[in-house]
Image (cartoon, rainbow, N blue to C red):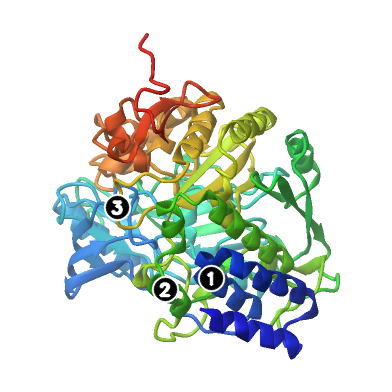
Amino acid sequence: MFTYLLRLQNSIKAKQVPMHLRGLSSKLISMAPATAFLLPLLSSVILLLAVVAVRASPPGPVVTCRSGNSNCTVTNAYGAFPDRSTCLVASVAYPGTEQELLAAVSAAAAKGQHMKALSAYSHSIPKLSCPGGPAGRGLVISTVRLNRTVSSDPARFRMTFEGGIKLRELLDAAASRGMALPHSPYWEGVTLGGLLSTGSHGSSAFGKGSAVHEYVVGMRLVVPTAEPVADTGYYAKVVSLGEDDRDLLAAKVSLGVLGVISQVTLQLEPMFKRSVTNRVVPDVAFENSISSFAATTPYGDIIWYPSQAVVVYRDDFKLPVSTPGTGVNDFIGFRAQPTLVITSTRAAGGDIQKLAEENEDTNGKCVLSKLNVNTLLSLGMGFKNSAGGVIGFTGYPVIGNQSDIQSAGSCLRSREDGLLSACAWDPRFRGLFYHQTTVSVPLVNATAFIADVKRIRDASPTGALCGIELNLGFFMRFVRASSAYLGKTADSVDIDITYYRPRNDPRRGRLHEDVLEEIEQLALFKYGALPHWGKNRHVGFVGVKEKLGEKVEEFVKVMEKYDGQGLFSSEWTDALLGLRGREVLVEADGCALEGLCICSADKHCAPDQGYRCRPGRVYQESRVCRKIEDAGAGLIQSA
């Protein structure tokens, strides 16, 4: 591993490392002797600093079959669901036209077979892509071939796309016609149907907000029928919904339980440019500025690194398309990662996060998180002032077309290289493995919530939150209240927290996991946060039916109208919606370690490792798994 350090040092002497990176590169080298166990990961960071141009193996299939298109296993982009279960299905269908889609749904409906639509990369963490019914008997309908632009209406700035089109293809198709999607998720490796089904969004509290479903003005669904349709004989039909059809309020955020999205018409706007500047400030009283920042920054977001006590404000504004600038968003975390480096870290001593966890090395994680944040900031978080060139970032502001700034994912777009490089979480080389808590806190509660999190931070062991700073800390975006039945009920700040998950041992406690569990429960229960449908552990969905209130009832009415037999429903979606007696929590020994339950007894944690169920330090209504030496310390008092 020292070879990489020497290579970088020689590159600095030869002036092959850009001037604005030499200081940071030298700092990494000087720190390395004091952090010897971090050297494998430091080498990875250094390769990143060198910004070597690499290709990337596109993600592998999320459905694999033992015999043609039969006897298949379905997973997601990360290779594991929250409960680590295996999804077995009888077969997979690959329709390429709406007529073929109609035939596939009809064939399954005629025999009462459960089914699910499956997107190209299946980036939902929860088990949304697995059909209900008996294991191994269902059907998945891949939308990978339903990926075309259907029509364009330049006069009204509208375009119609098939549901399986990937976000990058959609953005480029619109841009080629001088149009732009007003908002989108930051990750481009999602499909139109998938991102709508989970309510995915960008960041804005302006106008209709940042959720893509707010710009849906039409949709065609293929839904099952209990009896054959008179004029076709199919056990399925096409439902066409216009912008004034109230059923669209269910269809545009549907969890995939109404049927398969065949086509979507979007309201676009003329192409424009954006100006992006990342601004770093101390986190002193920053919670008081969240609402005003949202109200004055059309595309802004906030990253809070609580252990480092700093905040990164993304000042992001709309500009005329005539403004000079060819900047692009090539976020570093979404670039191809050299798999050799990642696998070599294991050969040199094991996964770095796992090593820090096993050694209970909070300081090691803090050192690493500082390196990570400094690297990201020095490289402009991946923004480039020009699409060409190797380094790209020369300073702020970065100005570019909306289609080039709003979303990133270059690890998806390169030619196959035999898995020499890939997206960082690719399960084929056992890439990053993590939990994600993503909740929408009502904007009116944001100040109080962050103030409480600061109290938790200050009451916890020093550095307890360093681990999340390896993954953008508290990543905050803005989303508006929605008329969609499963959309947000209030203007909110959406907070992403990504953190370590043991790959091989779900029964192993995590370093300072109690701190994140307390924050998670604080958001969900004290401040009434709603979960992101496509992220989160099971705990994130507790009480969601009650939080949505009558909107869930309205949604279920439409669901029963289009799929009265529940063929597109599953045990998981039933649990989310509070149907058929299903519940999201699973009680078992160790269940709280992976967020399958909230602990109420030590056995739900890992008492053999010293992790016991205790109240939170600040939000004492929470119940968390804390590692303590004295088994009798902090016992939960019975009422």
Image mark for residue 39: 1
Which image quadrant is residue 597 in?
Answer: top left
Q: CA distance from mark 2 to mark 1?
A: 9 Å
Q: In which quadrant will I find the C terminus? A: top left
Query: Which residue appears farthest toward the top when viewing the image?
Result: 639
Kindly report which numbered mark, 3 or 2, lies closer to the viewer in this rendering: 2
Say which residue appears at 37% left-offset and 65% top-offset: 143
Instruction: Please tell me which of labels 2 and 1 falls first in the chain.
Output: 1
Q: Answer whether labels 2 and 1 touch (C-beta < 8 Å).
A: yes
Instruction: Please tell me which of labels 3 and 2 falls first in the chain.
Output: 2
Q: Answer whether labels 1 and 3 touch (C-beta < 8 Å).
A: no
Q: Is residue 613 visible?
A: yes
Instruction: Please tell me which of labels 1 and 3 falls first in the chain.
Output: 1
Q: Is residue 106 above or below residue 348?
A: above
Q: Nearer the viewer, residue 278 or 352?
A: 352
Please state which amino acid type lies under the numbered disc 1: Leu
Image mark for residue 348: 2
- Measured as percent of width and height from the top left, residue 256 is found at 37, 49
Q: Answer whether labels 3 and 2 touch (C-beta < 8 Å).
A: no
Please state which amino acid type lies under the numbered disc 2: Ala
User: Which residue is identified by label 3?
Assistant: 505
In this rendering, position of residue 379 left or right of residue 43: right
Q: CA distance from mark 3 to mark 2?
A: 21 Å
Q: Nearer the viewer, residue 497 or 146?
A: 497
- Measured as percent of width and height from the top left, residue 152 is found at 60, 68
Q: Is residue 500 above or below residue 336?
A: above
Say which residue appears at 34% left-offset and 62% top-offset: 79
